[in-house]
Structure formats: structure tokens, C-alpha cells
Amino acid sequence: MDSRSSLSTTDSPSCLFVTLGCAKNEVDTDRMRALLLDEGFAETDEVDAADVIIINTCSFLASATSESIECTLELADQVASGVRSKPIVMCGCVPSRYGNELASELPEVTAFVRADEEDGIVAVVRGVLGMEGEQVSLGDGRVLRTIEGTSAYVKISDGCDRFCTFCAIPYIRGRYFSRPTSDILAEVRGLMEGGVREIVLIGQDTGIWGCDLGPDDTLASLLRDVAAVVRPYGGWVRVLYLQPEGMTDELIATIRDVDEVLPYIDIPIQHCNERILRDMNRSGSADELRELFDRLRREIPGMVLRTTGMAGFPGETDEEADELVNFISEQEFDYTSVFAYSPEEGTMAAEMADQVDEPTKLERTQRLIDLTEALGFAATARHVGERVKVIIDGIEEGENGLEFIGHAWFQAPDSDGAIHIAEGEAAVGDIVTCDLVDSFCYELIGVMV
Ligand code: SF4
């Protein structure tokens, strides 16, 4: 497909952004969006109105890769049936993972941009649109974000050195590196000035942030610095994707003692059985995890705990599957994401001999989902009767007319449910006080006070 169009620099071409995958991809798309808008491009959410389509893909699982490719082909179909041709730029994890193979496999795509090349998106888009004029110089340390909503993810690192045997991320995103403190704080400051009230720090392995910077650069020190930036705005900060080894004394004390740092702890354990953890190239055992969670509950009373569990890792026996179910049940996690193991091309676990058959994997996954939903609904109901601060995220049509939608400290945006408030006066971005009077599933009903 020849999708080059010719535009002069006086046009204001429109970009349609499509993001697949996780919060880290949302941040990457937002950075590309901000770079393009800063250079005078416009944004649209209509294929027909777009001059260029930018798809930020996910390749964490085989199913995510397929979804990314299907989505790209669907958009290519829509473009082909439209009145004018337009280029498609595929960014992120799929080009990072499959590189040169893609050009011949996906002729519908005009340009591929690996994750580590995304800061050059303006030059790429100018190129595919055949635009003349000076190309912007990138990689100059500018931290650009667009402000959308009251919570914002901020990436503090990229890559991963852990090489869990089931995970393709280290091959896709490369070696671990920490973003410097000054870059992160500048981004947080800009977001708060733009109306954001909650910062969510993310990375593949947030607990080791700073290991490649100075000896005083730790996640705890970063959290204290971010807390100082959000404090004047009445905002707060949470951190996701900690590994058990990342829970240092300094970090626990910071989460406990610094008001703006939310006592919301997200440690994806994947499993608790020692043999499976070892085969996953992870460390620990049920006893060690138990000790860690006991200690966290003792030292940070009232904290909320989120985790991730994986069903059907190669070699998992019925007894080992039961062990995970029993461990999650015993620990009563507030929130748990559940995944069925999927063999990812190029990973060690995909080559392991004793793969669990699909029906068994699905049965174990469903058992975990049923359990974790029951635990999560009960944990949500335990907040009824509390008086909490709520960030107002929006206004939506509810069952009985318009209502405010917000979230409290124990609800991570996009994943943990919301608070519905039928009456009151507030604007999006306000932090209001609510009594929590009822719950359903992961949702809560609040009354403004
Ligand atoms: S810690 Fe393990 S699961 Fe997480 S990104 Fe790194 S390799 Fe993948």
C-alpha cells in the first residue's frame, strides 16, 4: 500500500492514537502525543479524520501480540475502505520484539518504531506524511505529557534484568535503566500544575529504582521527593509493580510515615510454591512471602495489598495449584489479578517439557478468579462505614441519573473499582470527603460531607 500523502508544513495533520496493553504503554503513547502536539500536530479519535494512525502495541503475551496485529489489520481495512489513504505507524513492543521480520509480514504498516525509538516519533510522522521542513531535534531531555484526567502514570524505569522464565519483557524492553530523579520530578511537577492529583509510579521492577544511579538513589528517596512535589496540591502518590525483594526497611518506613505516599502495596507474587518460583527464576517460598506480608501488615497497619497470581506454569501439579489457592485465601489480598500461563516465544518456560494442558489451566485460572473476586468484594465491603478523601475523576450517567465518579487511596486507577456519589457540588480534580455507605462488587457508594 502506498500510504504516503503530501502535506505542507502549514497543514496541521491529525494523529489518531491507539494504545494496547498496560499502563506503561499509556505513558509511552502520552509522551508521543505530547511531542506531536507540541510540534503543531492535532489529535483526532476518528479514522476518517486522521492523517496518520499511530498504534502503540503490546507483546507481553502471545494473545497481546495477536490482538495488536488484529487491531492493526482492522485499522488498515478501515483505511482501505475510506476515501483517502493514510499511513499507519506501529510502535512499541511488537516492533521491539519482532524487528525486521515485520516489514515483510505487515505491508499495511508504513513505519515501525521500537519502544526505545519512540522519542523520535515526530521525525517518523513527518517522514511518513512526506512533510518538508526542519525536523525537530529530540532526546533533549524535555519532559512532555498531556494532561488527561486526575491521575497520571509516571514511568520511573524501563527494561528488566530479572529474566523470569515465563516473561518476554527483558527481550522486548532491554536491560533495566532508571530515569533520573530530575526528569521524574519535572514530569510530576508539570502534571500537578496541569491539574493531576494522583501520581502512579510504574516500571517493570520499581523496587530497584536507582540501582544504576547514585548510592543515595532509592525508591524510598524518590517517593519522598515526589511527595514533596505533590504536597502543595493536596495530591498523593502510589507505586505499582514492586518485587518482594524490593521491600526494604527504608521503603516500608517511607510508606508508613509520609502522608502523601499511599499505603497501597502491589507485589505480584505469581506463585508461592518454592519449586515453581525457582523454575520461574524467581526467589522465595510460601513461608518467606508469609513472613513479608505479616511484617508489612504489622508495620503499615491498614494497608491495602494487591498481587498477581499465575495458573498453570509448566510442571504445576494439582497440589501446587491448591497451594496457591490456599495461600491467596489465607492472605486475603484486597485485589488480585489472575493470569493463565501462556508459553511465550523465546522464553525458557516455553521450552519446558511438562506444559499444563489448556483445560486444566483454564479450570485452575477460573478457580483463582472465583476466589479472588470473593476476597476482593469482601475487602471492598470492609470500607463501608469509613470517611475517606475522594478524588473526583468525572461525571457519568448512573442508574439514577448523573453521578460523580471518584476514587480513594485504596483504589488504583483503572483497576480497583470506583466510588459513586449521587449528590453534591464538586469539579473534576477536586478532592472531597465522603462517607462510604454501601458497596457492590468492587464499587462503593459515597455520600459527600
Ligand atoms: S520482573 Fe519478571 S515478570 Fe516482571 S518484567 Fe521482569 S522478567 Fe517480566
Image: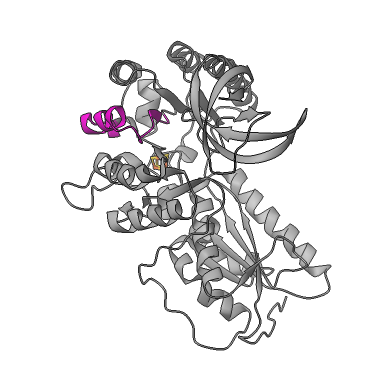
Residue in the foreground of this view, choosing between 364 and 267: 267
Instruction: For the C terminus, give its image quadrant.
Output: top right
Residue depicted at x 46% and y 19%: 333
Figure quadrant, ligand 1: top left
Residue at the limit of the structure toward the left, as seen here: 215
Q: Quadrant of the N terminus?
A: bottom right
From what the image shows, is residue 183 above or below residue 268? below
Residue 40 horizontal side relative to residue 410, left or right: right
Across the whole image, how many numbered discs are drawn on residues?
Answer: 0
Question: What residue is rendered at 63% in x and 41% in y?
Answer: 394
233 vs 176, nearest the viewer: 233
**Residue 79 location, x and y as percent?**
77, 67
Q: Is residue 311 visible?
A: no
Residue 359 spot, x, y in % from top left: 65, 25
Viewer-proximal residue among 27 and 86: 27
Q: In the drawing, does residue 145 fall left or right of residue 280?
A: right
Query: What percent of the width, then of the height, locates residue 278?
Result: 34, 29
Question: What residue is at 25 percent from the left and 48 percent from the top?
Answer: 210
Q: How is the image coloured?
A: one colour
Quarter of the rendering containing residue 143: bottom left
Could one spot residue 74 in this view of the protein? yes
| Magenta residues (range) | 245-268
Looking at the image, residue 202 lies above or below residue 79? above
Left or right of 74? Residue 27 is: left
Compare residues 144 and 240 and report the one nearer the observer. Answer: 144
The answer to if 328 sits in the magenta stretch is no
In the rendered image, residue 401, in percent from the top left (x then y), is placed at 77, 32
